[in-house]
Amino acid sequence: MATWNSRGLRGSTLEELINITNELYREKGLGLVQKIPTPITPVKIDKENGNISLAYFEKDSTVDYIGVVQGIPVCFDAKECAVDKFSLRNIHEHQIKFMEDFENQKGISFLIIMFTHKNEFYYMRFNELKGYLERTKEGHPQYFKYDELDKEFFIKGESGALVHYLKGLQRDLKDRD
């Protein structure tokens, strides 16, 4: 059974930036996207300060965020990477399945990847992710390199949005037409 420990906070910087962005989108009426909490059961609690120091995951979570943007259902996961190679092992099979099912229901699935060492954000379309996953079946390594990414899908902060992923979503939708 999976357990939570101090490594359970990986990605919290990116998630905080996305949470602030999502609040701005909500305030401006651009979208309503919410963080999906991961269900855990505490095992050890530090009674002095109330912190959970050990817990187990009740079930596999789906993705980090789900919502609607201008009538378009979206779901995405937030990932951080500290090097120029992103391991596909960071994306779990149940997450890929959920994203694929979401796409089959006419929703839009994607990843937001923060390359922390470059302070850059990337909007990865689900089809792009599937392409990297497919090539591993042909013997390619289970990662992709920063240099392989489509420069058009790097996203920046803009108009108060710290991670303005609506720009990536807009380009994604345009490419699907």
Image: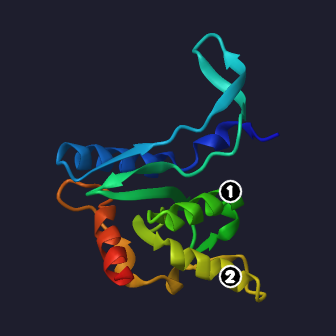
Q: Secondary structure at mark 2?
A: helix
Whole-number angstrom distance, CA of label 1 to CA of label 2:
16 Å
Q: Position of residue 2 (x, y in %)?
A: 77, 41
Quarter of the image with the N terminus is top right
Quarter occupied by residue 44: top right
Residue at horizontal 63 percent and vertical 63 percent from the top: 96
Quarter of the image with the C terminus is bottom left
Q: Position of residue 66 (x, y in %)?
A: 44, 50
Tell which of 105 and 94 is nearer to you: 105
Residue at horizontal 46 percent and vertical 56 percent from the top: 75
Q: Which residue is mark 2?
A: 134
Residue at horizontal 60 percent and vertical 58 percent from the top: 98
Q: Name the colouring of the figure.
A: rainbow
Three-letter amino acid code of the residue under disc 2: Glu
Side of 145 relative to 157 (left or right) = right
* For marks 1 and 2 on the same chain, the one whose residue lies earlier in the sequence: 1
Side of 102 relative to 175 (left or right) = right
Q: Position of residue 92 (x, y in %)?
A: 68, 59
Mark count: 2
The mark found on residue 129 in the picture is: none
Q: Which residue is mark 1?
A: 94
Quarter occupied by residue 58: top right
Q: Secondary structure at mark 1?
A: helix
- Residue 93 versus residue 152 in the image, above or below: above
Tell which of 92 and 29 is nearer to you: 29
